[in-house]
Amino acid sequence: MHSALEYYRWAARSQLRVEGRRFAAAVSRTPTVPALQVHGAVDPCALVSTAAASRRWAGAQHRLHVVDGAGHFPHEERPAAVTGLLAGFLSAV
């Protein structure tokens, strides 16, 4: 129970602490490194349009790849496709 609620306690307390303000400033900066976002085309939990909308927070080097025939766990449902995407992405950076 303690651990389940710690997120909420930290979210409230961090607003008043120096480390909380530092963390908020750090996560508000746009990343300058390449980012690959892999999303399942038939994900019942998060829409592809929602994933695509995260581009504005991910920076200019953000790439979204939608895996056909995969749901919420594309790495488990289409491992060969995801492995190929990761290998290609990592070899390019």
Image (spheres, grey):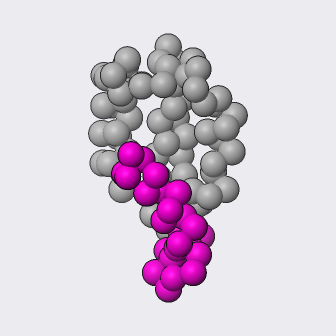
Instruction: Please indicate, yes or no, whether residue 31 appears anywhere in the rendered image.
Output: no
Residue at 65% x, 29% y: name it.
Answer: 47
6 falls in the magenta region: yes
Q: Which is the main secondary structure of the residues drawn in magenta?
A: helix
Considering only vertical position in the picture, is 45 above or below 16? above
Please state if 92 lies on the left or on the right of 22 as rendered.
left
Specify the segment rendered in magenta. Answer: 1-30
Query: Which residue is pictured at 67% across the width and 56% down the height?
Result: 56
Residue 53 visible at all: yes
Q: Confirm whether the magenta stretch covers residue 26.
A: yes
Q: Farthest top residue?
A: 69
Image coordinates for residue 91, horizontal then vertical, percent = 30, 48
Q: In this rendering, is residue 85 above or below 8?
A: above
Q: Position of residue 36 (x, y in %)?
A: 46, 46
Image vertical order of residue 30 relative to residue 85, above or below: below
The location of residue 50, given as percent across then percent down, is: 67, 38
Left or right of 88 in this view: 43? right
